Amino acid sequence: MAALTSPSANDRLNEAIVEQLDCCLAALSGGDESSTERVHTARKRLKRARALLALRRNQKPFRKERKALRLVAHSLGRVRDAAAIAHTWSSGGECISEPARSVVTKVLAEHQARASASERELRHLARAKRVLTPVRARLALTLEREPKQSSEQLEHALRAAYRKARRELRRADSRRSAVALHALRRAAKRHQYQLQFLEPLWKRPLKAQRKELARLTDLLGSHHDLSAIEELVNRAQRDALDDSWHEQLDRWRDELLGGSLELARVVLAESAHGFERRVHRLFTAQPAAPE
């Protein structure tokens, strides 16, 4: 990735947005990966594109495209979410005793089979590609036509995204609700992808911070998955399990919650103004030599 010093920062941002959409379209078009993995890759690229698009200070010209990108991501979500909660369960489900563990495993396997039927996945992929292709073209044209923004405007946009993550942390810390924690995860994920864009400025410190954010979003994602697992099991097998499995699930969830909030307080400890000043120094300093 090219150095992001002014005046190239604006051009590189526009290139990176379109690049992520091209990678998303490539995943939707096909390849050696399974359809489930293609969905995963496409959603990840969409999230990165949306995170980078948020760095444009003037969002009005991109209103329709932003809405379309969000809808495409949501349309692919059901298949990916089914795989994600199955993975979370397989990575920690041993803390749930039998017979509840076997019951939950069966419910999740059936849910994933329904969501991941090959023909259904392929229809989702084809539909997403049909919608995204013209959106990508319009967005590239709009980015080219819009006035270039200065590095100062980019710094302000970065600060706004970082401030939102800190605000969501305060809400999650006080409410401890699934909705608040999921909002924190979305804000942290966006900040993570934006730091990845900035890494060429100062690779080592930004990479370390970005990796901690990735760990945070993984913990918060697992916490969210446990709520989805509980909801699925309650719908399918409410009468087959006693209250002990809920108690075990709550202990698992509390461990993830405690670890998530503790890590978030560390990763987002810097003030928004302090973060912006640090970014400004990165923009004005010489880029670090590649490792």
Image: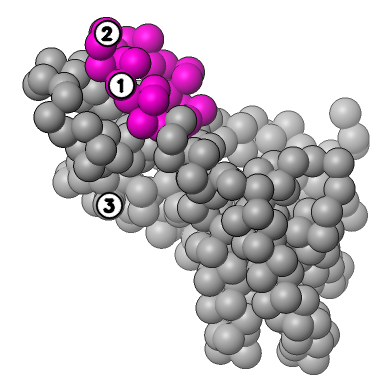
Q: Secondary structure at mark 1?
A: helix
Residue 267 locus on image (x, y percent):
47, 36
- Upstream in the sequence, badge 1 or badge 3? 1
Give the main secondary structure of the magenta stretch: helix
Q: Nearer the viewer, residue 201 or 222?
A: 222
The reply, left or right, for residue 47 in relation to residue 135 is left
Is residue 202 in sight in this rendering?
no
- The type of residue carrying mark 1 is Val
Q: Earlier in the sequence, mark 1 or mark 2?
A: 2
Label 1 and label 3: CA atoms lie apart by: 27 Å
Distance from Cα at disc 3 to Cα at disc 2: 30 Å
Contact between labelled residues 2 and 1, with CB atoms less than 8 Å apart: no
- Residue 260 lies left or right of residue 114; in this view the side is left
- Numbered label attached to residue 98: 2
Q: Is residue 208 visible?
A: yes
Q: How far apart are labels 1 and 2 at the CA level?
A: 8 Å
SS at mark 2 in the image: loop
What span is colored magenta in the figure? 85-108
**Quarter of the picture holding the C terminus:** top right
Q: Nearer the viewer, residue 145 or 37?
A: 37
Which SS class for mark 3?
A: helix
The magenta stretch spans residue 89? yes
In the rendered view, would you say 117 is above or below 214? below
Tell whether 32 sits left or right of 210. Answer: right
Q: Is residue 99 magenta?
A: yes
